Amino acid sequence: MGWVAFALAVGLLLYGFWRAWREWISPTRQLDRLVQALKANERPETFLIGDRGRMRRIGLALEEVFLRQRELRARAQEREFGVQAITGAMADGLVVTDGERRIRLMNRAFREMFAVAPLTSEGGLLEIVRDAAVERLLGETLAGGEARRGAMTLPGAAGQQLEVVAEPIKDDAGAVSGAVVLFRDVTGLRQTETMRRDFVANVSHELRTPLSILRGYLETLLENPKQPPAELLRIFEVMERHSNRLNLLVDDVLSLARLEGAGASLDLSPIRPANFLRGMIRDWEKQFASKNLQVELEAPNDLPPLQADEGRLQEVVYNLLDNAVKYSETGGRIVVRATHSDDHLCFSVSDNGIGIPARDLPRIFERFYRADKSRQRERGGTGLGLSIVKHIAQLHGGKVEAESEQDRGTTVRVYLPVAAVTKS
């Protein structure tokens, strides 16, 4: 009987251990592996724990949590991708702050404007922008709940100007919970406005002088029409000279307006550079002779043909020759060249005249800019010639450059792209 009781006790013990293993120990280990997989953001091999009972219900509940979490994560990633796509495509810098003025979102344009590293932790706006006016603007928006607008100059940039707009973020109850701040680069716009104002002022100034002279002589003739013949001839010559100046100014302004207009177009045709320049020099023989200028042409006949607007190109060379003649001393020398380099042709006109001061050289292609205002007015001109040259070159896809040394002469080069033209 003793052995039977012992065997029965051992059997019950083993059975109890088997039941405990099956219902608690093994499922607990499975549950631990399942939890570890979820913590690692991995999908477990199975959510089925044990055959039945509480552990199985826990596993199935965790499966529901996992699926719900994955769905929420997918939605969050989709929203985040949408936000990143929208803000990343913006040319304006964008910052979203909370009610405590801490940055919660910044786009790539903002990081580039203020040289913020991509991994920089988001702190206060003032720490990055370092502009008290912007900080005050944000504070007024958060306090008043209304949009505010201001301006700032970008630190470390040469005159780069930003327009700053702060818009409040409000919840359903109308309480301000944060703000969206936009930083828009308006440097180009400000420069355009300045150029427009300068252009109007310069045109007005250029018109005022000849008009004043014409009006003065007209008043003289009205008050005393019986002038001596010699004096009448002098008055008429002066009036003619200034009326021609007015006409030239109007023509140049209209030409520049057409070149800068959106509808500017080119009438392209094949041009042989050497033949073209020879014809231009023949047309200018009288002007060259008036100052006894020596003119040389350096343009090989085998230069590739150029696809260009011949009328516009004549205007380019006309302006360059006009400047060369105007600023050359009597008996001076002018060299007209055409050279080929890679995929460009270069037209250049050089003189050994009065030259341009180094401080003025970078600005000579600006409208109405005069390197020596008093001397240039004595020699005539509108101050628009080189600006017209620049715009025609750019319209052809080319560029211009100049080099000069005071009292030693000037060279202006026009680079135009060479297009393939079938030889006739």
Image (spheres, helix red, strand yellow):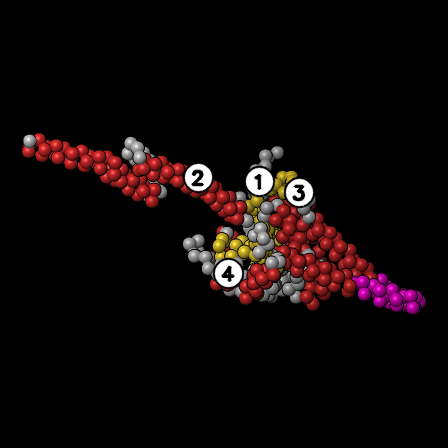
Q: Nearer the viewer, residue 138 or 317?
A: 138
Residue 48 locus on image (x, y percent): 32, 34
The quadrant in which the N terminus is found is: top left
Residue at which label 1 appears? 419
Q: CA distance from mark 1 to mark 3?
A: 14 Å
Q: Nearer the viewer, residue 137 or 418?
A: 137
Kindly give the residue lying farthest to the front in the view shown: 1
Residue 124 locus on image (x, y percent): 48, 61
Q: Tell which circle, 1 or 3, labels the residue nearer the N-terminal end.
A: 3
Regarding residue 161, the answer to whether it shows in the image is no
Q: Which mark is residue 100?
A: 4
Residue 363 vs residue 202: left or right? left
Q: Tell which circle, 4 or 3, labels the residue nearer the N-terminal end.
A: 4
Residue sitting at x 61%, y 45%: 396
Quarter-wise, where is residue 40 in the image? top left
Q: CA distance from mark 2 to mark 4?
A: 32 Å
Residue at which label 2 appears? 71
Residue at which label 3 appears? 266
- Residue type (three-letter) at the residue carrying disc 1: Ala
Q: Tell which circle, 2 or 4, labels the residue nearer the N-terminal end.
A: 2
Q: Tell which circle, 2 or 3, labels the residue nearer the N-terminal end.
A: 2
- Residue type (three-letter) at the residue carrying disc 4: Glu
Regarding residue 60, the answer to whether it shows in the image is yes
Looking at the rendered image, the disc whose residue lies closer to the viewer, 4 or 3, is 4
Q: Tell which circle, 1 or 4, labels the residue nearer the N-terminal end.
A: 4
Looking at the rendered image, the disc whose residue lies closer to the viewer, 1 or 2, is 2
Give the magenta-colored segment's residue range: 210-237
